[in-house]
Image (cartoon, rainbow, N blue to C red):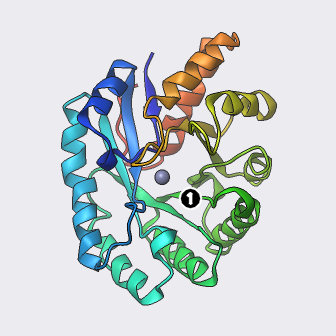
């Protein structure tokens, strides 16, 4: 059965991961721009990263029959210096028309600081101007609920449609509000922090399967590129119907991502 991993950082993963994902049924991924594990010291570092995301990585994925898409931004962790963030952001429009770019992401907040919020607003304005989809990162643990509310308010203020924005890394205490306000919600399946596959399936059982998806957010840290197929096994083990499993891990990503003319997958 085919699936889509709509949030994974393949620049940090090996070709073995691509191979195993393809064997497990992965046919498409989307890769948001993120923090590389260290702060980049020049805007040119981002230019090279965007080249990697729009040129190198799609070719690597294609070798395994996986469609690769991407989102561009300067992530909130490196957005504390507003002058630097503006310099990086001035590069983004050069790449927005690349054939695998879906929109702006993963933007959001990390420490919920004033400067981060300022840079978030600038990204949302760019998404509005270019009419792109948006993928949002929400802060960790104790900052998550407050950060999620700040982000949703900023999206509303920017005049963007909630149903063209996905709020990622939702958990039990944020998912209800995100869905109630009309946004899409992403559950990140991590071995320890964020949702385990079991917790994610609990959330689906409580809040339903509309406007929600699951991703591995695999990166250079402790994460699992096969987390989505593992969550599918958990749904199967609990005897959820195949149509429901397919909706969450394939149909829903297609419905949301298909709003971008650059999204391609064989249905
Ligand atoms: Zn991420």
29 left or right of 231 in image: left
Q: Is residue 236 visible?
A: yes
Q: Residue at x 76, y 55 (%)?
A: 181
Relative to the observer, which residue lies in front, 205 or 101? 205
- Rendered position, 205 above or below 119: above
Q: Is residue 250 visible?
A: no
Q: Residue at x 50, y 23 (%)?
A: 229
Q: Residue at x 60, y 65 (%)?
A: 160
Relative to the observer, which residue lies in front, 263 or 30? 30
Report the quarter where the C terminus lies: top left
* Residue 157, picture quadrant: bottom right
4 left or right of 240 in image: left
- Rendered position, 248 above or below 174: above
**Number of numbered discs on residues:** 1
78 left or right of 155 in image: left
* Residue 198, picture quadrant: top right
Q: Residue at x 61, y 40 (%)?
A: 192
Which residue has dot 1 on it? 136
The percent coordinates of residue 32 (x first, y second) are 42, 54
The percent coordinates of residue 211 (x first, y second) are 65, 40
- Rendered position, 68 above or below 76: above
Q: Is mark 1 within 8 Å of ligand 1?
A: no
The percent coordinates of residue 73 (x first, y second) are 41, 67
Relative to the observer, which residue lies in front, 37 or 153? 37
Give the SS element for disc 1. Answer: strand
Classify 10 Å Cα crowding around label 1: few (below 14), some (14-19), many (20 and above).
many
């Amino acid at each position: 059965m085919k699936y889509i991993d709509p949030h994974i950082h393949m620049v940090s993963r090996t070709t073995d991961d691509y191979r195993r994902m393809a064997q497990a049924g992965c046919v498409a991924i989307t890769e948001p721009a993120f923090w590389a594990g260290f702060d980049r010291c020049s805007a040119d570092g981002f230019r090279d990263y965007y080249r990697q995301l729009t040129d190198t990585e799609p070719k690597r994925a294609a070798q395994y029959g996986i469609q690769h898409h991407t989102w561009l931004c300067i992530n909130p962790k490196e957005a504390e210096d507003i002058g630097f963030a503006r310099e990086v952001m001035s590069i983004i429009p050069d790449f927005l028309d690349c054939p695998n770019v879906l929109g702006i992401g993963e933007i959001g907040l990390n420490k919920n600081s004033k400067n981060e919020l300022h840079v978030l607003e600038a990204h949302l304005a760019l998404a509005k101007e270019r009419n792109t989809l948006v993928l949002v990162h929400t802060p960790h643990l104790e900052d998550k609920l407050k950060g999620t509310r700040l982000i949703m308010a900023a999206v509303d203020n920017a005049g963007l449609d909630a149903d063209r924005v996905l709020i990622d890394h939702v958990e039990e205490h944020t998912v209800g509000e995100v869905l109630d306000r009309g946004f899409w919600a992403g559950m990140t399946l991590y071995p320890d922090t964020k949702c385990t596959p079991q917790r994610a399936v609990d959330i689906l059982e409580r809040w339903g399967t509309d406007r929600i998806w699951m991703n591995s957010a695999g990166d250079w840290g402790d994460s699992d590129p096969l987390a989505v197929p593992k969550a599918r096994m958990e749904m199967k083990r609990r005897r959820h119907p195949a149509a429901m499993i397919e909706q969450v891990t394939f149909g829903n990503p297609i419905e949301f991502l298909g709003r971008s003319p650059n999204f391609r997958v064989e249905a």
